[in-house]
């Protein structure tokens, strides 16, 4: 955390912080800031969210960030909203305390900062798996797909996961009706020996059904459901069973194979790979407030995971 250490009267550290926050102050303002920092705050490590560093304005309270991943995420995404920073830090702390964090490869909280890059960033590691945006999906306390846009996570499941037992979790914050039956919230399929290997998921189709295709097997749940909710597609590590959970509860089970696709996972659409040919279709019309990719979790851990995500959702008013 060296780049945001503000040690009382250390003006060099203050200058460094201001430069990274893209703030410019006069010498008088710097002197006053130094005095106020020294008198008001004793910050050894953390993130100082200062909305005003000019004379006549009040320096906002410091936000102490306990996780270096959040620190880097906030800095790179230029996220200055104190509630958002706090929600992110609580999210990561909870995932670590429940021993879920290490099973995750990528976590996309889809929060907005002062840069267009912030909703694309991977909270687990900002240097890896940034979402490449295609089309005009918009930000609305999450990302809203319009039926013509998608994001490429750059995650190749066959390369990222050591075992063919993925957990893919998504939070849907809408119940929009797609124009097509094949409208998926995420997906990637690869044709190998005439069989589709992959994962894809739709929260609600034109008939109100839920559908998931995972590792060579298609399962259709004919219950009409509200698309709003937190979903996890989770392949059990000790069997050929794949479970779909919604809001912490088992939604349905089905038997699946164990071959991961050698292609990138998309959010907001499905990538279909057949040999050297790749096509994209099944565009989503839903609003997504959270997305993660990782290794399979136990049923107990999934229930806890959904509770943590729901807490994050409530903190941001999603």
Image: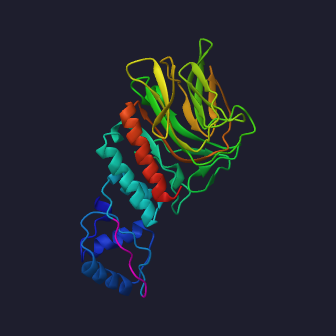
Residue at 49% in and 58% down: 316
Point out residue 84 in the picture as x, y percentages from the top left corner: 45, 60
Q: Residue at coordinates 41% horizontally, 38% vertically from top-left?
A: 303
> Which quadrant of the figure has residue 54?
bottom left
The secondary structure that most of the magenta stretch takes on is loop
**In this picture, which residue range is highlighted in magenta?**
56-63
Q: Is residue 201 above or below residue 228?
A: above
The answer to whether residue 75 shows anywhere in this view is: no
Q: Is residue 37 above or below residue 144?
A: below
Whether residue 60 is in magenta: the answer is yes
Left or right of 74, for residue 282? right
Looking at the rendering, in which quadrant would you find the C terminus?
A: bottom right
Which image quarter holds the N terminus?
A: bottom left
Q: Nearer the viewer, residue 300 or 141?
A: 300
Q: Position of residue 31 (x, y in %)?
A: 32, 84
> Quick check: can you spot residue 227?
yes
**Considering only vertical position in the picture, is 105 above or below 9?**
above
In the image, residue 79 above or below residue 38: above
Q: Which colour style is shown?
A: rainbow
Residue 279, given in percent of the width and then of the height, sits at 67, 29
Which residue in the rendered view is the most extreme toward the right?
179
The residue that appears at 44% across and 64% down in the rendered structure is 83
Residue 49, by quadrant, is: bottom left
Q: Is residue 289 highlighted in magenta?
A: no
Q: Position of residue 283 (x, y in %)?
A: 68, 38
- Asked whether 303 or 275 is in front, the reply is 303
Name, please, the residue furthest toward the front: 223
Count of numbered marks: 0
Instruction: Quadrant for residue 75, please give it.
Output: bottom left
- The answer to whether residue 70 is left or right of residue 225 is left
């Amino acid at each position: 955390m060296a780049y945001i250490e503000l040690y009382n009267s250390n003006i060099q550290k203050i200058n460094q912080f201001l430069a990274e926050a893209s703030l410019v102050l006069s010498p008088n303002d710097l002197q006053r800031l130094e005095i106020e920092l020294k008198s008001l705050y004793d910050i050894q490590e953390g993130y100082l969210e200062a909305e005003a560093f000019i004379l006549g304005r009040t320096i906002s309270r410091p936000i102490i960030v306990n996780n270096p991943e959040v620190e880097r995420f906030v800095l790179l995404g230029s996220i200055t909203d104190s509630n958002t920073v706090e929600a992110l830090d609580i999210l990561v702390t909870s995932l670590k305390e429940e021993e879920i964090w290490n099973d995750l490869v990528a976590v996309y909280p889809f929060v907005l900062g002062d840069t267009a890059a912030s909703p694309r960033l991977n909270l687990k590691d900002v240097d890896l798996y940034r979402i490449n945006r295609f089309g005009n999906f918009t930000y609305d306390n999450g990302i809203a797909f319009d039926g013509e846009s998608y994001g490429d996570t750059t995650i190749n499941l066959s390369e990222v996961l050591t075992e063919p037992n993925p957990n893919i979790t998504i939070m849907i914050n809408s119940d929009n009706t797609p124009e097509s039956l094949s409208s998926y919230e995420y997906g990637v399929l690869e044709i190998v020996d005439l069989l589709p290997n992959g994962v894809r998921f739709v929260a609600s189709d034109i008939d109100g059904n839920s559908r998931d295709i995972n590792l060579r097997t298609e399962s259709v749940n004919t219950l009409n459901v509200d698309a709003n909710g937190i979903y996890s597609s989770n392949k059990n590590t000790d069997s050929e069973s794949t479970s779909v959970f919604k809001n912490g509860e088992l939604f349905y089970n089905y038997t699946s194979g164990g071959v991961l696709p050698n292609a990138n996972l998309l959010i907001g659409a499905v990538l279909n790979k057949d040999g050297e040919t790749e096509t994209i279709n099944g565009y989503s019309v839903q609003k997504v407030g959270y997305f993660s990719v990782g290794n399979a979790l136990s049923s107990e851990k999934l229930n806890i995971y959904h509770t943590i995500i729901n807490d994050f959702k409530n903190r941001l008013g999603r």
